Amino acid sequence: MLKLQHLTKQFGAAPLFTDLCMEVDAPVVLWAPSGWGKTTLLRILMGLERPTTGSVEGVGRVAAVFQEDRLCPQLNAVQNVTLVLPGVENQYKEQIISGFQQLGMDIAALQLPARRLSGGQKRRVALLRALWAPSDTLLLDEPFTGMDPDTLQRAAALLRQRCAGKPVLLATHDESAIRALGWPVVELEKLGTRAKA
């Protein structure tokens, strides 16, 4: 169980959010207006930023999709995913290729270095890498950016299939993605407060 207790984050004198409390033991969608602090909250859960006050418990090992793809540009799609499986990468190669095919990427695309992939293809690589990484908690920041509607549906189906039973926080503004996932929506505004600009 992932627990956020009285979490506050401020930059200088300006609070981003205040007294945020939440418990998560299954996949949820994080929703809040732009600028409210969804990405900052995910970065706190990843351990990349510290809250001003409050605590986080139960995160364990984290796998993540950042707003940037963060791929190794010289490696192909499959090699980027197997980076998170040191020592057993060959054991799962066929399953990883099958996952890419489920997401609509053909063998020709899988052979290209990541730098030559389209934006939507890079997002699929980043998403599949996070799904294969050993983790207790999965954090996804706008994972469907650049995906066409058909690919988004495929990606949502894969997430539903692979993420049951673990804390997943997915931040998105995409209403079609929220409908495709069918996960509960957590409105951050209702869990904490934010100072008015």
Image (cartoon, helix red, strand yellow):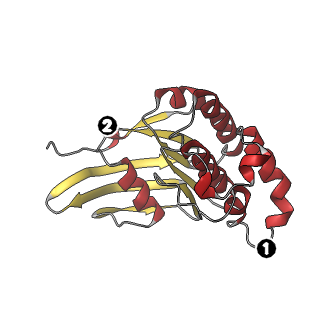
| Furthest-bottom residue in this view | 87
Residue depicted at x 28% and y 51% = 19
Q: Closest to the observer: 45 or 58? A: 45
Q: Up-down: is 88 above or below 196?
A: below
Q: Up-down: is 10 above or below 102?
A: below
Q: Up-down: is 34 above or below 137?
A: above
Q: Are marks 1 and 2 in contact (CB under 8 Å)?
A: no
Residue depicted at x 29% and y 44% = 36
- Judged left or right of residue 195, residue 44 is right
In this figure, which residue is indicated by the disc labeled 1? Answer: 87
Residue 124 place in picture, x, y as percent = 62, 46
In the picture, residue 86 is in which quadrant?
bottom right
Indicate which label's residue lies in the foreground, 1 or 2: 1
Mark toward the start of the polypeptide (1 vs 2): 2
Residue 33 is marked as: 2
- Judged left or right of residue 128, residue 14 is left
Amino acid at dot 1: Gly
Q: Secondary structure at mark 1?
A: loop
- Judged left or right of residue 104, residue 185 is left
Number of callouts: 2
Q: Closest to the observer: 151 or 23? A: 151
Residue 23 place in picture, x, y as percent = 47, 48
Distance (Cα) linking label 1 and label 2: 42 Å
Q: Secondary structure at mark 2?
A: loop
Amino acid at dot 2: Pro
Quadrant location of the C terminus in the rendered image? top left
Residue depicted at x 64% and y 33% = 151
Quadrant location of the N terminus in the rendered image? bottom right
